[in-house]
Amino acid sequence: MEDCMESFSECLFCKIVKGEIPSQKVFENETVLAFRDINPQAPIHILIIPKRHLESILEINEQDTPLFASIFAAIKQIVAKEGIAERGFRIALNNGPEGGQLIKHLHFHLLGGRQMIGRLG
Ligand code: AMP
Ligand code: ZN
């Protein structure tokens, strides 16, 4: 448990939620935060995260349904504001080592503003 607590306090995205590390916020409500990726892979590259520390999809359970509804509602608002709702965009979630997840705080990538190349993988 101590290890667990320690890793929360060290979590980069938890620090962003707490305002200990600056970020370019584009959306915030009680449970969700969205901010621009520091190393954008597209003209629009935004990360959408639950404010509560969840490491991965494996930690989600049924009680989290409202949280994920809120995340998708946030995405809808963000794409409208960024002007890419109709043009289209890609949502990606890297989960676990082979999924390419570097930051162990669950996050959705929103990529847009250019044609996405390839389909998946
Ligand atoms: P992933 O590989 O899915 O874990 O993605 C982590 C993402 O976090 C990468 O796209 C990084 O560029 C991004 N990132 C890392 N540090 C920061 C930061 N301080 N602010 C914003 N984005 C960050
Ligand atoms: Zn965290």
Image: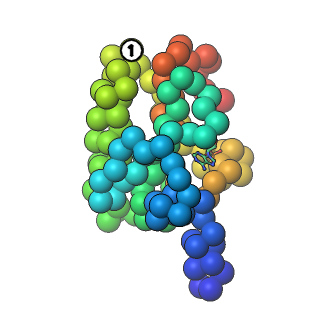
Where 116 sits versus 66, above or below? above
Identified at 58% across, 73% down, the residue is 9
Quadrant of residue 61 in the image? bottom left
Give the colour scheme of this rendering: rainbow
Please state the total of marks drawn on the protein image: 1
Identified at 50% across, 27% down, the residue is 44
Where 113 sits versus 13, above or below? above
Q: Can I make out residue 105 in this image?
A: no
Quadrant of residue 27 in the image? top left
Direction from residue 24 to residue 71 in the image, left or right: left
Residue 23: horizontal and vertical position, in percent? 51, 48
Residue 40: horizontal and vertical position, in percent? 60, 32
Identified at 48% across, 43% down, the residue is 24
Question: Which quadrant would the C terminus be assigned to in this image?
Answer: top right
Question: Which quadrant would the N terminus be assigned to in this image?
Answer: bottom right
Residue 105: horizontal and vertical position, in percent? 55, 58
What amino acid is found at the position of numbered circle 1 in the picture?
Answer: Arg
Quadrant of residue 43 in the image? top right
Residue toward you, 59 or 110: 110
* SS at badge 1: loop
Identified at 39% across, 14% down, the residue is 87
Residue 11: horizontal and vertical position, in percent? 60, 64
Residue toward you, 63 or 104: 104
The 10 Å Cα crowd at callout 1, few under 14, some 14 to 19, many 20 or more, is few
Q: Can I make out residue 27 in this image?
A: yes
Label 1 sits on residue: 87
